[in-house]
Image: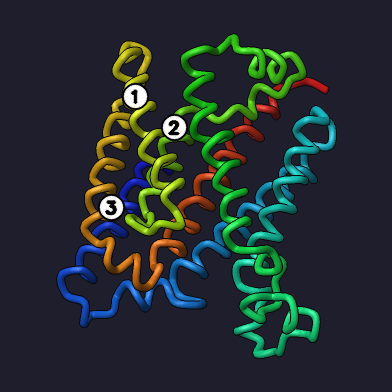
Amino acid sequence: AFRYFYLSNVCLAYGLILVSKLWPKTGLLARATIENGFYEVATAITLLAGAIGLGWRWLKLSASSWQLRLGCIAMALLCFIGAGEEISWGQHWLKFESGEFFQSHNYQKETNLHNLVNPILFSTLINVVLYVGFILYPFIHWVFPKNRLSHLLIKYNLGAYIPPITIAILLMLAHCFHGWFIPQVYSDTAALLGSWSLGLALMLIHKKRVNHPFLWVAMLVCGIGFAVGIGASDIFQRDNFQYEIRECFTALVLVYWAFGWSGLLEQIKP
């Protein structure tokens, strides 16, 4: 059910972009992606819900494997920190000023940690983790399940952490909200197109192992997303509306993944 909910919301976001492209005076996209707008608040709520859910699971499963408990509490903390960072720990809602340290070192002069790091470096690190660990590796594991890394993870009862290709495809859908033709992110463009092409090629080669039509539909919608993004590239180049949308959908996928592996690990005896 989540997958179709996610896919329908991706399509709605495509529609929002097309409306803003064809009728820019509506200002719908701008209102949805502004500071403390719909997508930013939705991202924070998603991460907070993930933190509460995983924290509750951590408390309830005291007799479960150490892998489950460590994974749950680590992911719960990451979700909580991510939610706070997304809304600058409530600074804009509570109307408090940033301290001297953040005024001096935060490039947006907000009370958060992620803006203390060079934004290009920070986004590059995030993209490397997402593309390598959550997009490319799931396809490698799907085709070569006995590869050395997967063997080690399974050997130490960590195999449930391996993202399925569904997660890889859902993340590619999130990354379709991308700033096309912006020189600073050409590497991201290459990674996105390369990952999608590789994933589609592997699915075609091993099509008998594709066990659900949703995967084909999602890959098709991903291709449509490329066309929508390219058609609206002038909007993205000018206003960077794509980032808030991408963050929201990425958060949804990662929380979905976390609840998936924590449910599987629950079956492992300590």
Callout 1: SS: loop
Look at the image and tell me in which quarter the C terminus lies.
Answer: top right
Q: Earlier in the sequence, mark 3 or mark 1?
A: 3
Q: Which mark is residue 166?
A: 2
Label 3: few (<14), some or many (≥20) within 10 Å?
Answer: some
Q: Earlier in the sequence, mark 2 or mark 1?
A: 2
What is the CA distance from the residue labelled 2 to the residue labelled 1?
A: 10 Å
What is the CA distance from the residue labelled 3 to the residue labelled 1?
A: 20 Å
Q: Earlier in the sequence, mark 3 or mark 2?
A: 3
- Name the kind of residue labelled 3 in the image: Cys
Residue at left offset 59%, top offset 9%:
146
Q: Which mark is residue 11?
A: 3
In this view, which residue lies farthest toward the left? 22
Marks 2 and 1 in Cβ contact (< 8 Å) = yes
- Name the kind of residue labelled 1 in the image: His
- Name the kind of residue labelled 2 in the image: Thr
Marks 3 and 2 in Cβ contact (< 8 Å) = no
Q: Nearer the viewer, residue 164 or 133?
A: 133
Residue 51, by quadrant, is bottom right
Above or below 265: residue 18: below
Residue 257, by quadrant, is top right
Callout 3: SS: helix
Residue at left offset 64%, top offset 17%:
150
Left or right of residue 150: residue 70: right
Left or right of residue 204: residue 71: right
Which residue is disc 1 drawn over? 212
What is the CA distance from the residue labelled 3 to the residue labelled 2?
A: 17 Å
